[in-house]
């Protein structure tokens, strides 16, 4: 007998649960397109050369200790992270209006930002896109915010529902928080154009809606760190305030190291100081202070111009391979004469393709082809290779005909 005997079995996480099911499948042709982690052409996880190099430097440094970091994390890492996303010449940084704290990857940054807002911001409603990354509603609800959604994706065009987005943000209460994917929207792979971003910015600023950017894929969408930060920089350039959650999981391949940062761009330097003092009160009882190793890797790379350049080359290599996979899958379906318009595969951007396959077709492909993806039909392009694309194309072809 147990005092916990009455506890019900919880369901698997809808994204991570895909891998659990995949691991149980004995088929030699099985394919995991569920989780958003980069794989090489050989299907292997990748540690970037520049990351191995940085780790060597760290290990060989005899003065390196394992003391606690401050509550806010590694100061050098925080500075470099703000520069990376906002740009080296960002006026907000020069005016000391940005406070940055190291957090547990993107998820931890969102959670700390959410809890800070729930405690100190006057409007507790956050609008998230429909659909969005499955963890967003849970993170923000548990942070103490009220979650609502705004229209984002139009299944008929497999593109942005721009009209719906503007309507929903127009009718949001003044001051509401709005979660925006900085680039490579997950799960749809659909981003606003620059012109559309500009209209979103104008609308949000005119209604005093507070932007909360989630940047989990900087450099992964186009292969350029600066291009993928364009949306964010537009909102900083107008002098307004915002929150920014940054992750190094994908763009440096540091998934399990849990390295990320929360930045809050404030109206003035003295507000930024007070905001940071309150962020410390959020963090201290949650996990005290963040881990040192991953942030040290990132700082080592970002502060050295040679290593930084080496990183951008490797990053572009990952982005380009994903773009090639898009083209190859599109071509494979065309060759098979698979019914339907599949051009969204090459139009969408980032790690995922939102295929448009329904949950029955997803289940069919798992059953008959041992191909695993989330039930919304999202596939990780990073999990594909030239070798596995024919198998996937066969499966899609059969599923839709
Ligand atoms: N936000 C989005 C949109 C994501 O897709 C992810 C990861 O898949 C994250 C945040 C957070 O990831 P992590 O906590 O591993 O940095």
Image: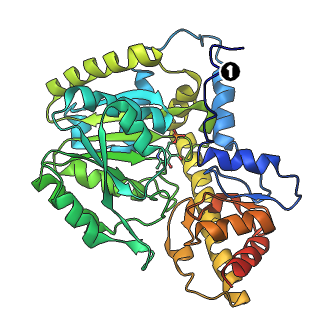
Residue 83 pos. (x, y %): 36, 40
Q: Quadrant of residue 97?
A: top left
Where is residue 78 drawn, in percent x and y?
Answer: 40, 29
The residue located at (74%, 74%) in the rendering is 395
| Residue that badge 1 annotates | 59
Residue under the point 37% across and 27% down: 101
Q: Nearer the viewer, residue 84 or 130?
A: 130
Considering the image in quadrants, where does the C terminus appear? bottom right
Callout 1: helix, strand or loop? helix
Q: Which x, y percent locates residue 152?
A: 35, 64
The structure residue drawn at horizontal position 60% and vertical position 51%, both measured from the top left corner, is 36
Does the rendering let one see residue 303? Answer: no
Report the coloring of the rendering.
Answer: rainbow
Q: Is residue 75 above or below residue 140?
A: above
Q: Is residue 313 left or right of residue 151?
A: right
Vertical comparison of 196 with 283: above or below: below
Mark 1 surroundings: few (<14), some (14-19) or many (≥20) residues within 10 A: few
Query: Considering only vertical position in the picture, is 236 above or below 354?
Result: above
Instruction: Tell me: is circle 1 under 8 Å from ligand 1.
Output: no
Classify residue 8 as left or right of residue 230: right
State left or right for residue 371 relative to residue 283. right
For the N terminus, the image quarter is top right
* Camera-side residue of 140 and 213: 140
Position of residue 292 measured from the top left corner of the image (x, y, whole percent):
55, 20
Judged left or right of residue 395, residue 176 is left
Q: Is residue 125 above or below residue 98?
A: below
């Amino acid at each position: 007998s147990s005092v916990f005997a009455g506890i019900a079995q919880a369901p698997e996480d809808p994204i991570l649960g895909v891998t659990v099911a995949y691991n149980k499948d004995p088929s030699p042709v099985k394919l995991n397109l569920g989780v958003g982690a980069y794989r090489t052409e050989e299907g292997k996880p990748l540690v970037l050369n520049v990351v191995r190099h940085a780790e060597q430097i760290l290990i060989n440094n005899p003065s390196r200790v394992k003391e606690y970091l401050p509550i806010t994390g590694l100061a050098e890492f925080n500075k470099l992270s703000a520069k990376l996303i906002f740009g080296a010449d960002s006026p907000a940084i020069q005016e000391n209006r940005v406070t940055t704290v190291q957090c547990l990857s993107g998820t931890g940054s969102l959670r700390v930002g959410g809890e800070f807002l729930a405690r100190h911001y006057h409007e507790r409603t956050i609008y998230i896109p429909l659909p969005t990354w499955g963890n967003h509603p849970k993170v923000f609800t548990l942070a103490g915010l009220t979650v609502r959604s705004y229209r984002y994706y139009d299944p008929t065009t497999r593109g942005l529902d721009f009209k719906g987005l503007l309507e929903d943000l127009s009718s949001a209460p003044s001051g509401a928080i709005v979660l925006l994917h900085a680039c490579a929207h997950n799960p749809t792979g659909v981003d606003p154009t620059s012109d559309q971003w500009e209209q979103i910015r104008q609308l949000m600023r005119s209604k005093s809606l507070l932007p909360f950017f989630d940047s989990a894929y900087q450099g992964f969408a186009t292969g350029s760190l600066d291009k993928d930060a364009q949306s964010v920089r537009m909102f900083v350039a107008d002098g307004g305030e915002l929150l920014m959650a940054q992750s190094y999981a994908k763009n440096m391949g540091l998934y399990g190291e849990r390295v990320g940062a929360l930045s809050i761009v404030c109206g003035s330097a003295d507000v930024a100081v007070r905001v940071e003092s309150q962020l410390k009160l959020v963090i201290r009882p949650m996990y005290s202070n963040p881990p040192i190793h991953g942030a040290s890797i990132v700082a080592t790379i970002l502060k050295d111009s040679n290593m930084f350049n080496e990183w951008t080359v490797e990053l572009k290599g990952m982005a380009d391979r994903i773009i090639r996979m898009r083209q190859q899958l599109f071509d494979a379906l065309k060759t098979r004469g698979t019914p339907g318009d599949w051009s969204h595969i090459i139009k969408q951007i980032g790690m995922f393709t939102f295929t448009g396959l329904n949950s029955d077709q997803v289940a069919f492909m798992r059953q008959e082809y041992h191909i695993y993806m989330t039930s919304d039909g999202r596939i990780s392009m990073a999990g594909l290779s030239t070798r596995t694309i024919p198998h996937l194309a066969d499966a899609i072809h059969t599923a839709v005909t």
